[in-house]
Structure formats: C-alpha cells, structure tokens
Amino acid sequence: MAFTIQFVIDVLSLGGAYALMALGLVIIYGILRLVNFAYGELIMVAGYTMFLASGSGLPWIVMAVLAVAMAILFGILTDYIAFRPVRAKSVTAVLITSFAFSNLLQNAALLFISPRPRNVPLPAVFSQTVSIGGAITPVRNLITIAASIVLLAAVAFLMRRTTLGIAMRAAATNFTMARMLGVPANLIISSAFALSGFLAGVVGILWIGRIGTVVPGIGLEPLLVAFIATVIGGMRSLPGAVVGGFLLALIDTTLNYTLSQDLLKFRDAFTFSLVILILLWRPEGLIKGPASGQRT
Amino acid sequence: MLDVRDLSVSYGTIRAVRGISFTVGKGELVSLLGANGAGKSSTIKCIAGALKASGGTITLDGRDITAASPEQVVRAGLATVPETRDVFPDLTVSENLMLGAYIHRRDPAGNRENLDRLHTLFPRLAERAHQPAGTLSGGEQQMLVIARALMSRPGVLLLDEPSLGLAPAIVERIFEMIETLKKSGLTILLVEQNVNQALAVADRAYVMRLGAIVAAGTADEIRSTSDLSAHYLGG
C-alpha cells in the first residue's frame, strides 16, 4: 500500500512538472508552428533571479513572484528579439534566432554570474518530508502536484472561457482568418509568450527545488522533456501535451522503480526506446491537434 | 464606398492582378466574375489585407486601407468571407460567432442583439450553437462564416465564392440569404463563378480575365454580352 502511494505521488509530481513544461512549449508551437528553443532558458532566468534576490532579505514568496515575473518578461523578450523581426520571413531564420537567443542567455549567465552551480534559496518546507499511509514523501512533491492541478485548471479556464484564450485557440488553427476577424496578431503572440514564460517560471522554481542549485545549462533537460512530451502527446494539442507529460513521467518513474542498479544509468535509453515505439504506433502523437480547417 | 484604383498583386514575379479599377457604391451589390485563375480571389485577399498590393490604392469611405493589416481592415468596417470557408473546426459554433465580434467585445449587449438577429436569419446555427464547427455540413459552415463576418457589424462585406462545392439546394438558400442581406442595406462585393446566380442578385458586375477587367456594366448589360462564355472558356 505504502509502495503504491509512493509510486502514485512520484508519477503525479513528476508528471505535473513535465505537463506544465510541455504546455509552455506547445502554446507557442500551436500558434507559430515553431519550437521555441530558448524555452529552457526561461527556467534558467527564474533560477538566477532567485539566486540574485537571495541576498535581498525579501520573503521567499516575493522572490518566487519576482522569478516568475522575470521569466514572463524574458518570454516576451524572446518574441521581440528572436521571433518578431524574422517571423514573416523564414521558418529557418526563426529556428536559428531562437537557438541564438538561447545561447546568448546561457553565455550571459556563464560570463556575468558563474559556470559553477549557485544556491537558490528555498523555504524549509521544500526539504521536509511527510508520511502518507506509510509512504515517506518530500513535501515539495505534494506542492508540485498542487501547483500543477491549479495551473492546469487555470490554463484550461483561460483557453475555454476567456475571449483571449478562444482567440489564441483560433489563431492556432488559422492565424490569417483570426486576423481577418480583427484579432491582433502581435497581441496574441505576445500573450502566448507571456503565458509560456509564466509556466516556465513556475516550473523552474519547482524543478530547481529538487536540486537546490542553478547552472547555466539547467534549461536543457526541461526543454528536452517538454519536447518529447509534446511529440508523444501530439505537437498541436494542449491536452495532448499534458497527457504526454504524465505518460513520460509514468515511463520514467516505472523504470526508476524496476530497473536494477546496473541498468539504471541507461534509463534514458529505455525511455527513448519506448518513445520510439509509441511514435511508430501513433506517428501524429496520442491526441491529434485541431484540423487545419483548410479546404481546397 | 469601396474604391479600388489600379490595383496590382504579385506572387514573386507572377502578376496575378494587373492594375484593375472598380468601385462599389453604398448599398450596392457588385459581382466580380471570372474563371479560375482570373485573379478574383487575389483581389479579395488584397482588399482584406491578407496580401500586400504591389501597386495601386484601395479606399474605404475615403480612408486609404491599401497598406492596412487584416485586423485594421475589419476595424475600418470591411468584413471578408474567404473562399476557403475557414471555420475554426475545434471551436463551437457560438465560440466562432463570439470571435467574429472580437472588435466589439466591450459591447456584449450589442453583440447579443446582433446574434439574435443572425439566429433568426440562420436558425440552423442556433440549433448547433454548442457543437464544434468542424462537425457542421458544408452549407452550415458557409452560413457560419458569413454570420461570423456579420458579427463584426461591417459596412462592406466581401463574399468569395459562397456557392463553391455546395449542393444546388443549399446554393439556392445561400443566394436567398445574400438577397436578404442586400435588402438590409449592406454593401456587398460578391465573387462568383456561378454567373447566372450572381447576376440575378447583382446590381452591377465586372468580368475579370488573366488579372485584368475585360468587361463592366449593369447586371443586365453583362448578361446580354454575347462573349461572356468566351471570357470563361478562354476563347
């Protein structure tokens, strides 16, 4: 029983984090059909903001809000610097500018802060554990689960019930038609980047909360995870990104529990083999995105 | 009301529209006729702001909208129904209509009134309000895009091939609806390949061929022009 509870909590907390990461990536991809390779750096920005604010004596929650705000700001900056100037010109150009922006941010962190890990302040509750039905579990896993439930519900509400969300979904299926109804392109794209930055900021704090330190390359793993989760779930579907995130967490956690010590270092190889199998079975991902609505 | 002067549209080196001029007066229904590839849809997309003009001017109510973006054009009072019949398939019918009123989103009372009027005109859309638009039939989707365009309360409506690919009975109903809209005082530019039906509702018509206007006149004059089919068949 304790084992089952432990397993479920592990899957849900990892899955919640993966789902939020994937959602942040797919929101941009859905509208612009472009992967934002600078997405991982938004997590890095949140981490370094926490590090830089740690000497200020501010309450932790204020530092966390500041970190999320900086991630949102850098999300919007990604749009202005890497996407907007070349958006209309070529897909390849945006691919390269988003890589370049990612590199620029990483190198700025290397140069101006340090290549070595920096401590991020965490409230005491992050390192405490509780016992639930006999299973000893870190409180931060429960915080992660709670945060993902709240955020996934909030994003669902935004996308289904507000004019901005409905306009974003419309822009994701047919951007030109949405503009012909008066939906301003730049507002929608900037909102998507801001939302993406918001999710990256929250996930960044939760993610860094596992290790307690931030390094310039911290964003690489979340970017990869988000990318794989969206590919499994279906690149253009928001529910698909969430399903993909939880499925990937299920695979990872199951392998963690079942693989022997010798094999555990090859965990990623097993994970990717399963991902390949899923894609052979469902090349478009588990949930197909909205049809393009085009008729010829 | 809508005044197009020497308009040219190019795709790279290919000139799809070669310096055409036409006008649509207030409350008028003007039809733009021509075969496939004559440049009709390029003209429509260019007026709507979805394509950049390579030359000429477009004025709406005396305002220059030649270089305007699609969102500025609809704010200026010109709504477009593209031939691709672009409903947002995973959004419900009412969400589609709500987006049509995006520029009036601060006026929910006015939108509700407008929606009630459109539901009387298209009862089918009221029945299917909560269904995803992608599940509608072709005719219903056409009604939805027209109703959605009208939710922006336009002064001028551009209709690109509303009868394309629809069953004759549905086409009949679409044209009845166009007549109703015309009687309500709406200014309409109708692009059609269905010449007879378009001329039956139009006040005036222009015939396009290979990117240029080759004939212009009242609907009756165009109808009696003997070489109309020649323009279509390329004779």
Image: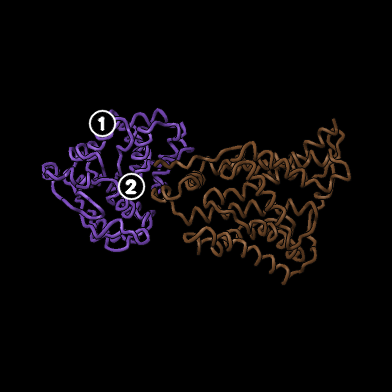
Chain colours: A brown, B purple
Where in the figure is residue B135, as x and y percent of width and height? 45, 31
Q: Secondary structure at mark 1?
A: helix
Of residues A249 and A134, which is closer to you in this image?
A249
Mark 1 neighbour density, 10 Å: few (under 14) some (14–19) many (20 or more): some
Q: Relative to B45, is A157 above or below?
A: above
In-image side of A95 versus B100 (left or right): right
In the image, what residue occupies the spot 53% across and 53% down? A191
Q: Secondary structure at mark 2?
A: strand
Residue A181 visible somewhere in the drawing: yes
Residue B31 visible somewhere in the drawing: no
In-image side of A196 versus B83 (left or right): right
| Quarter where residue B203 is shown | top left
Of residues B223 and A154, which is closer to you in this image?
B223
Q: Amino acid at mark 2?
A: Thr
- Dot 1: chain letter: B
Q: Relative to A44, is A136 above or below?
A: above
Give the label, 2 or 1, closer to the camera.
1
Residue located beneath label 1 in the image = B172
Numbered circle sitting on residue B80: 2
- Dot 2: chain letter: B
Q: Relative to A111, is B180 above or below?
A: above
Where in the figure is residue A250, as x and y percent of width and height? 74, 39
Where in the figure is residue B85, as x and y percent of width and height? 37, 41
Q: Amino acid at mark 1?
A: Glu
